[in-house]
Image: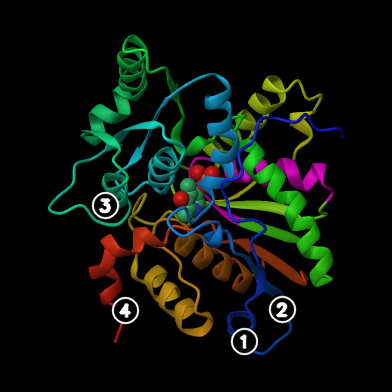
């Protein structure tokens, strides 16, 4: 398939390493034969830009610039990694950044929010109920204000997950193909945390376009399987329409592993924190309680339950999120000794 060439900025540190987690693999397999777990270190896409969002924003911000915009408006939770990456990139590119956040800070800003403030973003806070019912209105109202001030604004949807953002992980699949060749592996499965669907959408499309021969699984950290089956297809459909790609979206194999959301988005139970501590101690790899810790905990549980029986190699995408660990220091402290 011949891919169109969308505008792109070089913002992420690429390629990121692919690394085997042999001590974790040995532990989860309990001495018997089992899959080798690998991690694609997309937590290393940048220092303060760490994580998956900068891959998408290379395309999203290029589009905003191509449209002549000087202001970026986006939205998310108080500890949104996407908002933090956007705020810092706007500063780097000399753009205004306006964030619409769900919730209000209690006490001093921490984690991602502290970095949003440091980067000089303008921030509006809305209680969860208002945010959920009026988000679109808030985004467009802010845009109208900037447009009227001759500071044309571009709205980026939650997580930069739309047809533009799909490019981030569609292009990452070309990188993965080279990683697999270099490592001499043919992984049967690729697993990521899914929060707004764009990473999974890009991977699902890219695995097919670049013939990776692996199944892509998203472990959702909010909502449910039905919601993401629809959202992932929707983002790929949007991609196909925007770029006039002749692609049969219905032929895609979209796979969601539900069951690891726990008490709710950004709330994790003790076993997730225990997995975070174990992975840090055995591998020196830091996961977060909102996305990667929950999803990696889910991956280990699914390996134990036999879902990936017979697989030789599984690749987990480390999508970043480490700043989200700090605001949950007291939950984490309960598993440290
Ligand atoms: C946003 C995010 C995800 C989820 O990616 P989506 O494309 O929104 O599904 C996973 N991990 C981290 C750390 C994130 O910030």
Q: Which residue is mark 4?
A: 335
- Above or below for 78 versus 23: above
Give the distance between the C-alpha atoms of the residues marked 2 and 3, in whole angstroms.
Answer: 42 Å
Tell me the residue at 30%/57% (across/down).
Answer: 111
Question: How packed is label 1: few (under 14 Cα within 10 Å), some, or many (20 or more)?
Answer: few
Tell me the residue at 54%/26% (across/down).
Answer: 65
Task: From the top left corner, tell me how far across and down residue 287 is, in percent.
Answer: 45, 67
Q: Which residue is mark 1?
A: 30
Q: Which residue is mark 2?
A: 34
Q: Residues at badges 2 and 1 in contact (C-beta under 8 Å)?
A: yes
Give the distance between the C-alpha atoms of the residues marked 1 and 4, in whole angstroms.
Answer: 22 Å
Q: Is residue 309 visible?
A: no
Q: Which residues are magenta?
A: 192-211
Rendered image quadrant of residue 41: bottom right
**Nearer mark to the viewer, of 1 and 4:** 4
Task: From the top left corner, tell me how far across and down residue 220 is, in percent.
Answer: 51, 49
Q: Earlier in the sequence, mark 3 or mark 4?
A: 3
């Amino acid at each position: 398939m011949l891919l169109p060439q969308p505008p792109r900025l070089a913002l992420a540190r690429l390629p990121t390493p692919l690394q085997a987690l042999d001590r974790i693999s040995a532990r989860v397999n309990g001495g018997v034969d089992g899959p080798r777990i690998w991690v694609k270190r997309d937590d290393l896409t940048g220092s303060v830009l760490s994580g998956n969002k900068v891959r998408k924003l290379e395309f999203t911000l290029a589009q905003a610039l191509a449209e002549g915009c000087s202001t970026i408006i986006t939205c998310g939770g108080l500890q949104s990694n996407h908002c933090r990456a956007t705020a810092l990139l706007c500063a780097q590119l000399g753009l205004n950044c306006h964030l619409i956040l769900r919730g209000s800070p209690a006490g001093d800003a921490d984690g991602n929010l502290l970095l949003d403030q440091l980067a000089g973003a303008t921030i509006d806070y809305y209680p969860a109920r208002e945010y959920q019912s009026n988000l679109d209105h808030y985004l467009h109202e802010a845009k109208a204000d900037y447009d009227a001030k001759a500071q044309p604004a571009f709205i980026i949807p939650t997580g930069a997950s739309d047809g533009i953002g799909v490019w981030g992980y569609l292009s990452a699949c070309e990188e993965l193909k080279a990683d697999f060749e270099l490592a001499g592996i043919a992984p049967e499965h690729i697993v990521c945390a899914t929060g707004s669907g764009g990473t999974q959408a890009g991977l699902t499309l890219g695995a097919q376009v670049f013939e990776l021969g692996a199944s892509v699984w998203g472990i959702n950290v909010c909502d449910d399987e039905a919601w993401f089956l629809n959202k992932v297809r929707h983002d790929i459909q949007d991609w196909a329409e925007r770029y006039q790609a002749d692609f049969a979206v219905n032929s895609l194999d979209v796979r969601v592993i539900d069951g690891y959301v726990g008490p709710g988005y950004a709330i994790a139970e003790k076993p997730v924190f225990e997995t975070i501590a174990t992975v840090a101690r055995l591998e020196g790899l830091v996961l977060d309680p909102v996305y990667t810790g929950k999803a990696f905990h889910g991956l280990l549980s699914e390996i134990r339950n036999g879902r990936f029986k017979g697989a030789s190699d599984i690749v987990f995408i480390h999508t970043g999120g480490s700043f989200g660990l700090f605001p949950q220091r007291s939950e984490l402290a309960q598993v440290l000794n």
